[in-house]
Structure formats: structure tokens, C-alpha cells
């Protein structure tokens, strides 16, 4: 077990992401958000885009999980080997990669991508949408398995909160791997339950770092 991954055990990872057109879309703003999350006890920061990765890496002391979203259809989370290497060069300690079984735009298989990243000394977090994805990611030697894409690939229904069923299956089937729970964790109680169910770590984004969505929750309730 890499010491960096070991340091995440039982702890919170905060996702700091904003997208084009959003009010907080600026690398310096995301770095400030990451600093605030670190001050609150975040064990790591997950972020997207080379500018944000670089800005956040230059500010926080905790590990950075980097990804690069490119496109809107099919595989768009770090879709190629080039994207993954660029995230590492920008300062990511761990690179998150789409680990679904869909075609990759550079023609490499997921396993080939992981092998080449490992040759470069890069740790890989597998963003999965189903148990079948995790089986592929585990066989490829991924360093971390994550439920990130549950409900977004058509293989599993999108749950209102965390996909606890998926998490339970993953923890039971892959005890030798750190399994992270990511996706629709909206309350501290849900985060605590995720850890109690055996997740290595829990990733929370929207409920902490996306004020527009949080405001919408409140206005809808009123």
C-alpha cells in the first residue's frame, strides 16, 4: 500500500470543481476553496483541469487527486494517456481515470493505460460505474477503485444519495483494494455511513464546494 493512499483511510476527500460559465470558475478561486477544505480537515483534494491542479498543488499540503474532463459524451474523465500524464505533470499525486469498459479515444485499453502510467510512477484512481468496471480496473492493477460513475453510464440507476448497494458489493468483492465512495454524498450522516460500510475514504464535492447547488436545495425546500 502506497503511504499516500494509506493516509486517506477513513478520511474525507473534498472535490473542488467548477465548470465553464459558473461563478467560481477560476484556478485561484478553486485553490482558495481547497485551502478552506484543508483547514476543515480534508485528507486530500480532488480537482479537474490542468490550471486548477497546478494552482491547488501550489497551495495545499495534502495530496491532490487530479483529472481532466474533456468532452461531454462517452469517456471524458481523463480520456487518454496524454490527458492522464498531463495531470501528473501539472502536480497531481494521484490521477483519476474513467475506468468504464467503453472505447477510449486514443485506442488504448484501460489496462494498457494503467500499465504505462505505472511505468511513469503515477498512481491511478479508477472511476467506475459498475461492478463489471471494477473487475476490469482491479485486473488492470488500479491503485484505487471508486464508485464515481455509478448512475452515469446506464448500467446502474441513479440513486438519490450514495449508491450503497454498489458500495457494499465493491467492498465485499475487492477486499484487497482501497474502495472510495464518490457520488451524491450530501450529508455528514451519509459520509459516516459510507465509512461504516467499509469504504476506504469518502469523496464529497457538491455538498461542500458548490454553493449554487446548495442554494438551490434551500430554495427548493422553501
Image: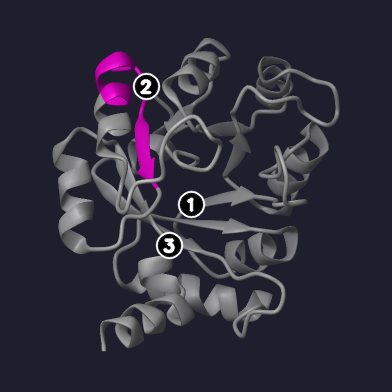
Local SS, label 2: loop
- Residue 11 in the image: above or below residue 153: below
- Residue 217 in the image: above or below residue 68: below
Mark 3, residues whose alpha carbon is within 10 Å: few (<14), some, or many (≥20)? many
**What residue is disc 3 on?**
205
Q: Quadrant of the C terminus?
A: bottom left
Q: Is residue 170 in the magenta section? A: yes
The Cα–Cα distance between marks 3 and 1, rounded to whole angstroms, is: 16 Å
User: In the rendered structure, which disc, 2 or 1, sits on the residue that comes first in sequence?
Assistant: 1
Query: Which residue: 34% across, 44% down?
Result: 8
Colouring convention used in this rendered image of the protein? one colour
User: In the rendered structure, which disc, 3 or 1, sits on the residue that comes first in sequence?
Assistant: 1
Residue 18: quadrant of the picture: bottom right
Query: Which residue: 70% across, 79% down?
Result: 21
Please name which of the two marks, 3 or 1, marks the residue nearer to the observer.
3
Instruction: Measuring from the top left, give residue 114's x and y in whole percent.
Output: 66, 22
- Residue 44 in the image: above or below residue 172: below
Residue 38: quadrant of the picture: bottom left
Instruction: Measuring from the top left, give residue 107's x and y in whole percent.
Output: 85, 22
**What residue is disc 1 on?**
63
Q: Which residues are magenta?
A: 169-182
Query: Which residue: 73% across, 45% down?
Result: 73
Amino acid at each position: 500500500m502506497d503511504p499516500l493512499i494509506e493516509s486517506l483511510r477513513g478520511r474525507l476527500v473534498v472535490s473542488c470543481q467548477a465548470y465553464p460559465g459558473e461563478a467560481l470558475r477560476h484556478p485561484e478561486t478553486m485553490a482558495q476553496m481547497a485551502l478552506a477544505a484543508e483547514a476543515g480537515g480534508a485528507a486530500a483534494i480532488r480537482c479537474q483541469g490542468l490550471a486548477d491542479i497546478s494552482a491547488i498543488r501550489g497551495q495545499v499540503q495534502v495530496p491532490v487527486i487530479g483529472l481532466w474532463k474533456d468532452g461531454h459524451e462517452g469517456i471524458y474523465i481523463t480520456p487518454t494517456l496524454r490527458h492522464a500524464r498531463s495531470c501528473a505533470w501539472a502536480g497531481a499525486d494521484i490521477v483519476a481515470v474513467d475506468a468504464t469498459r467503453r472505447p477510449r479515444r486514443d485506442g488504448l485499453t484501460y489496462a494498457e493505460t494503467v500499465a504505462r502510467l505505472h511505468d511513469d510512477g503515477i498512481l491511478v484512481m479508477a472511476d467506475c460505474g459498475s461492478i463489471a468496471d471494477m473487475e476490469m480496473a482491479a485486473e488492470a492493477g488500479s491503485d484505487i477503485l471508486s464508485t464515481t460513475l455509478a448512475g452515469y453510464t446506464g448500467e446502474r440507476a441513479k440513486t438519490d444519495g450514495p449508491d450503497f448497494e454498489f458500495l457494499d458489493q465493491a467492498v465485499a468483492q475487492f477486499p484487497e483494494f482501497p474502495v472510495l465512495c464518490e457520488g451524491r454524498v450530501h450529508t455528514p450522516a451519509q459520509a459516516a455511513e459510507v465509512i461504516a460500510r467499509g469504504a476506504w475514504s469518502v469523496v464529497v464535492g457538491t455538498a461542500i464546494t458548490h454553493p449554487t447547488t446548495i442554494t438551490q436545495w434551500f430554495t427548493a425546500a422553501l
